[in-house]
Amino acid sequence: MRLTVLGCRQGMPADGQSSSSYLVSTGSARLLLDCGPGAATALSSVAHPSELDAIIISHLHADHCYDLLTVGKTLLSGRLRDPERFPTLRGAARAEWPPVPLYVPNGGRAKLDLLASVFPVPSFPMLDRSFDVAFDVREYEPGDTFTVGDCEISMHKLNHSLLNCGTRIESPEGSFAFTGDTAYTPDLVALAANVDLFLAEATLEQPDVTTHGHLCAAEAGDVAAAAGVKELVLTHFITADDVWLAARKADAERSFRGPVHLAAPARTFDIRSSAGARS
């Protein structure tokens, strides 16, 4: 199992970094977790969207799902290729890729249809059908489980201003958990219990005292220690400043004694008993 960081920025892209988006790959499955602004570009450097076996969205804030429209239009674009108009272009043949399963929180389909309707293409109406042709949209509830390839996936309700579910993935190759966005809650320990790699947001410098719902790095370290995870990767950063990020890593290391890593675009992590990071 491997984690590839496509985007790790909180909110909108900045400093050349995309918003929240991660690719988890095993021998028989490729899963895209979240699809924030910039994710479609980052994904295109490692895979075509048609190669994905599923996309899982933690919650429907724009910085975690906005590029679904771009990915959908990419999947539809093959249907509109006319090789006669591009006689010397390699790969210009018409292509119809099967719909990619897209898991979103309950009520998400209506919101995504509304998003697609904002940018119509009257001359090519097929391009307006991301969420009924390009994707096979499947709404989930907290506690739902499903299987993709060799991956058993479970959705865990956490604590955010919109319904947010953490994603736990277990396969013969390893185990993995991702928080999405959440304030501290004891439910995080169950989400991450004994996983080989825990991908946790570390948006804040201090614990959240608002109702919005975000973690700081120290809390991520506390959860990792309590859950007995093997490795911790911090993500969802407000800055790319190396000094600030190093301080957040140190915050997590005060309570978690295992390896702590900082997410960065294109950074990969092999998820196994002796997991390590490669850039």
Image (cartoon, rainbow, N blue to C red):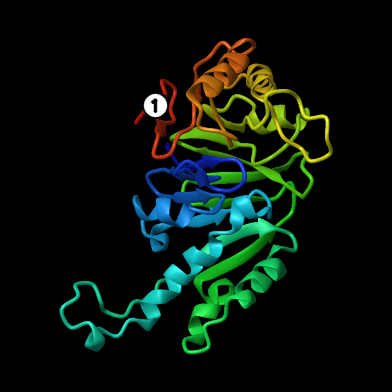
How far across and down, in percent of the image, does residue 149 sit? Answer: 47, 51
Q: Quick one: 239 or 235, which is closer to the camera?
A: 239
Residue hosting label 1: 277
**Vertical arrangement, residue 268 with respect to residue 153, above or below:** above
Going by the numbered disc 1, the residue's amino acid type is Ala
Seen at 42% across and 61% down, the residue is 49
Name above or below for residue 259 compared with residue 26: above
Quarter holding residue 158: top right
Q: Residue at x 72, y 46 (%)?
A: 164
Category of crowding for the residue at label 1, using alpha-carbon neighbours closer than 10 angstroms: few (below 14), some (14–19), many (at least 20): some
Relative to 85, say whether 109 is above or below.
above
Q: Is residue 231 visible?
A: no
Residue in the image at 54% along x and 54% along y: 37
Seen at 64% across and 23% down, the residue is 217
Q: Position of residue 123 (x, y in %)?
A: 48, 89
Q: Secondary structure at mark 1?
A: strand
